[in-house]
Image (cartoon, rainbow, N blue to C red):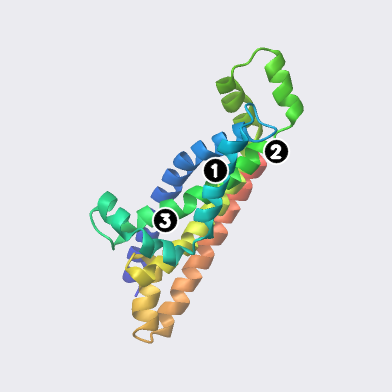
């Protein structure tokens, strides 16, 4: 059993790690656009903000298991196949991008407006304000958001096991549910609990350090 569990844990770490990295990098773009075009942003634009805000909300509304099925053609296009550990990274990333965008937007918009105005008065460019003011001041909130993203992706990766994504969810379904092996269900559940607790602990330490 332990060999199977360890292999599944490695697959879960692979899926969650890559999808977290991709979703944070890609999700940062709409987060910045939403922040800049908001009514209190650097360049308010009601139309741009409204459209992007709507799209983020739409994609956040899809349950992961349904989204995974809907984007199967896109997954095949990107990964070359619809099932497997690598293929699962595609729907995991797509599902996390709107979540990351919203979390980062909230973090960026929580920056004290007085600090932004002070940067403007010193002649700072938009790029300097975004990277040296918004990002610098919102680091603790961004780290907390990334921690939540990792924890959500752990849960999504487990659900993806129902559609052949691999990882701990796949082991729980194939051995625990289909073969009625309660010991597999218990062990995979315990591993997931410990993993989530460890992620939250590291996230809390990073948050405290960044304050």
Q: Quadrant of the N terminus?
A: bottom left
Ranked by sequence position, the earlier of labels 1 and 2 is 1
- Mark 2: secondary structure: loop
Q: Position of residue 86 (x, y in %)?
A: 30, 55
Q: Give the labeled residue for mark 2.
A: 110
Q: Quadrant of the C terminus?
A: top right
Q: Quadrant of residue 39?
A: top right
Q: CA distance from mark 3 to mark 2?
A: 27 Å
- Mark 1: secondary structure: helix
Q: Residue lying furthest bottom in this view?
A: 180
- Mark 3: secondary structure: helix
Q: Residue at x 50, y 71 (%)?
A: 190
Classify residue 86 as left or right of residue 54: left
Q: Give the labeled residue for mark 3.
A: 92
Tell me, yes or no, if residue 9 can be seen here: no
Mark 2 surroundings: few (<14), some (14-19) or many (≥20) residues within 10 A: few
């Amino acid at each position: 059993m332990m060999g199977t569990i360890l292999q599944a844990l490695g697959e879960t770490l692979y899926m969650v790690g890559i999808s977290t990295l991709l979703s944070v990098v890609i999700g940062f773009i709409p987060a910045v656009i939403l922040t800049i075009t908001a009514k209190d942003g650097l360049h308010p634009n009601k139309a741009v903000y409204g459209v992007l805000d709507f799209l983020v909300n739409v994609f956040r509304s899809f349950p992961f298991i349904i989204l995974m099925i809907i984007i199967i053609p896109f997954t095949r296009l990107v990964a070359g196949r619809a099932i497997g550990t690598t293929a699962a990274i595609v729907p995991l990333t797509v599902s996390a991008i709107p979540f990351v965008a919203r979390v980062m937007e909230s973090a960026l918009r929580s920056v004290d407006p007085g600090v932004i105005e002070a940067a403007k008065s010193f002649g700072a460019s938009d790029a300097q304000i975004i990277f040296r003011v918004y990002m610098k001041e919102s680091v603790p909130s961004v780290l907390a958001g990334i921690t939540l993203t990792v924890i959500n992706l752990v849960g999504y990766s487990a659900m993806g096991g129902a559609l052949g994504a691999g990882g701990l969810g796949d082991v729980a379904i194939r051995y625990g549910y289909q073969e009625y092996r309660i010991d597999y269900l218990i062990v995979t559940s315990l591993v997931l609990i410990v993993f989530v607790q460890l992620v939250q602990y590291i996230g809390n330490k990073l948050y405290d350090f960044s304050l």
